[in-house]
Image (cartoon, rainbow, N blue to C red):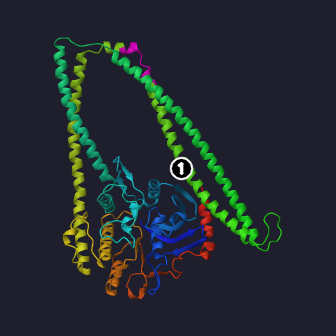
């Protein structure tokens, strides 16, 4: 399975400016003039690609990402899709712009995208240790390099990566197929079985002591038939029943409030859509120099059009906020309904328990003697002993399966060492000791102009290993931003770019490089050169906003 980018749309509704960039399968290079081509927006384009897919990129402060809207047209195994991002609002569409899902949370977004890519990194949570699908950024880590974060064998090209303990090693192993859902399930099962094994061993010891005590009591006939404890249990059930009933009533009231809020949000969204249509109609009349109210001819319409354009911007912002509120309210209702159902089930269980009457309890206790208890303990000892034997066998089998993952890791590390030693020799990176390449978990970095080279060879080694040892995982586009953004000679610059072209073996490569000339490089296929010729700090323009505003309106207004 593979993903490729087709088109990227960047919109600034407040400024009424936009930009569209088209990509092709294979190699794409975003470039600008060698003499004065800095600050043209190459990095903004590169960072926006995976940002549109749910990552948090390192944009410069002058690029106000919260006020921008990102639309990415992409393909997954030949099927076209669009993803729309405005702040934390995501919408996913098919090729015909039919809305498939809406999301406002990164974990949920990752779960939804997995339905189309078949891949999502899964890691144990920081607090619960329960295996969970991570936010989508962890899916893209090996595929993106930010121009300001060439840090050797570290993942630092995205923000907000500290959500998981030791995330770098765990994510790396997951991408390489060393860790997968089955591995974590084995580890979790092993831990649970080990706890049960220890608990059953302790239980067996306790049962032995209990049997000895009861046998000594049977010798003297010293035992009690007091049923006060059981009566106390029945009273406790009644109190717990009342507590659950109170929670049920509160839950019901909460559901009513949430449904009322959802109705209000939907009504407001409908009103905003009507207001948007009316405002657009008035703008068209003003463009024709007609008064929207009386139809008379107006010579100067600039001020009136400006007010209505500002209103249009406000409408887009409010509609996005309302859609987020609707999505959150819908999810809250679903959670509250599940809670309500759970409380109903608890209520039914307590009702059954409370029905035990005192006479029946007395009869049960009256016919239970220490002899029967002794027989029960003997039977339980036998059962617990069998469980211990079963758990011991299961633990041996699990250990055997886990060893297979260790063997795979060893094969990958052998290949990893080979790839990096070869690359070290090619680029003369003698400052990095080969010993650093023997473990995937070892970190290394070079200095000066070699820092970018060391980072690139590590990323490409990981991607090649991923392709070889985890071939069923989807291949995302490789996006390397300005790999030659350090002071170095032209020979090294050329060698590094050619190395990337020769070794980036995925379905699509997107590079940025100032003053790129494709005639200086050899590749198997064509190189799609995208030259940015806009003024400095002016990536977006008015004309593009007018030309592509329709797709913004269609995707913004779409609702489930």
The secondary structure that dominates the magenta segment is: helix
- Image position, residue 77 (x, y; %): 45, 66
- Residue under the image location 52 percent in, 75 percent down: 21
- Image position, residue 508 (x, y; %): 42, 73
Is 444 colored magenta in this rendering?
no
> Is residue 49 positioned above or below 134 on the image?
below
Residue 326 is left or right of residue 158, and the answer is right
> Is residue 39 positioned above or below 3 on the image?
below
Is 353 colored magenta in this rendering?
yes
> Is residue 133 positioned above or below 58 on the image?
above
Could you tell me which secondary element the residue under label 1 belongs to? helix
- Image position, residue 42 (x, y; %): 46, 76
Q: Which residue is more in the foreground, 514 or 468?
A: 514
Q: Which residue is mark 1?
A: 328
Q: Which residue is more in the foreground, 39 or 525?
A: 39
Q: Magenta region: which residues?
A: 351-361
- The quadrant of the image that shows the N terminus is bottom left
- Residue under the image location 79 percent in, 67 percent down: 291
- Image position, residue 364 (x, y; %): 34, 15
- Residue under the image location 47 percent in, 35 percent down: 342
- Residue under the image location 33 percent in, 58 percent down: 167
């Amino acid at each position: 399975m593979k993903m490729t980018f087709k088109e990227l749309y960047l919109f600034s509704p407040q400024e009424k400016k936009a930009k569209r960039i088209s990509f092709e399968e294979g190699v794409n290079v975003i470039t600008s003039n060698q003499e004065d081509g800095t600050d043209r927006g190459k990095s903004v384009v590169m960072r926006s690609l995976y940002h549109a897919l749910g990552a948090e990129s390192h944009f410069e402060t002058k690029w106000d990402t919260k006020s921008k809207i990102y639309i990415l047209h992409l393909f997954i195994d030949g099927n076209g899709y669009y993803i729309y991002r405005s702040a934390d609002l995501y919408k996913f569409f098919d090729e015909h712009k039919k809305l498939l899902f809406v999301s406002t949370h990164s974990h949920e977004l990752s779960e939804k995208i997995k339905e189309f890519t078949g891949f999502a990194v899964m890691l144990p949570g920081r607090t619960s240790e329960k295996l969970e699908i991570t936010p989508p950024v962890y899916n893209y880590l090996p595929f993106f390099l930010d121009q300001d974060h060439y840090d050797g064998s570290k993942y630092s090209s995205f923000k907000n990566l500290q959500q998981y303990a030791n995330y770098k090693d765990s994510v790396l192993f997951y991408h390489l197929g060393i860790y997968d859902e089955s591995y974590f399930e084995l580890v979790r099962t092993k831990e649970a079985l080990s706890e049960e094994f220890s608990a059953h061993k302790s239980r067996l010891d306790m049962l032995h002591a209990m049997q000895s005590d009861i046998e000594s009591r049977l010798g003297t006939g010293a035992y009690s038939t007091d049923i006060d404890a059981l009566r106390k249990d029945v009273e406790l059930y009644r109190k717990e029943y009342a507590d659950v009933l109170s929670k049920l009533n509160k839950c019901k009231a909460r559901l009513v409030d949430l449904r009322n809020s959802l109705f209000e949000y939907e009504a407001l969204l409908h009103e905003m859509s009507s207001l948007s249509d009316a405002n657009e109609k008035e703008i068209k009349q003003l463009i024709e120099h007609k008064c929207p109210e009386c139809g008379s001819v107006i010579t100067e319409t600039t001020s009136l059009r400006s007010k209505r354009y500002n209103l249009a911007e406000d409408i887009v912002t409010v509609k996005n906020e309302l859609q987020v509120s609707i999505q959150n309210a819908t999810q809250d209702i679903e959670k509250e309904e599940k809670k309500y159902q759970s409380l109903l089930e608890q209520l039914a269980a307590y009702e059954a328990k409370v029905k035990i009457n005192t006479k029946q309890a007395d009869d049960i206790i009256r016919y239970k003697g220490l002899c029967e208890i002794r027989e029960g303990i003997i039977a339980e000892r036998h059962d617990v002993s069998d469980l211990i034997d079963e758990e011991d066998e299961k633990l041996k089998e699990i250990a055997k399966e886990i060893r297979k993952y260790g063997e795979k890791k060893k094969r990958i590390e052998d290949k990893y060492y080979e790839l990096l030693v070869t690359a070290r020799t090619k680029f003369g990176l003698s400052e990095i000791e080969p010993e650093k390449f023997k473990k995937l978990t070892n970190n290394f970095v070079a200095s000066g102009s070699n820092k970018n080279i060391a980072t690139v060879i590590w990323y490409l080694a990981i991607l090649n290993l991923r392709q070889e040892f985890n071939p069923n995982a989807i291949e995302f586009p490789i996006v390397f931003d300005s790999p030659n953004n350090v002071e170095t000679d032209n020979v090294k610059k050329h060698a590094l770019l050619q190395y990337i072209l020769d070794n980036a073996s995925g379905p699509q490569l997107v590079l940025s490089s100032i003053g790129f000339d494709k005639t200086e490089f050899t590749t198997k296929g064509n190189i799609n050169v995208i030259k940015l010729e806009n003024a400095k700090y002016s990536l977006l323009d008015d004309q593009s906003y007018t030309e592509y505003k329709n797709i913004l309106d269609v995707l913004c207004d779409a609702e489930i």
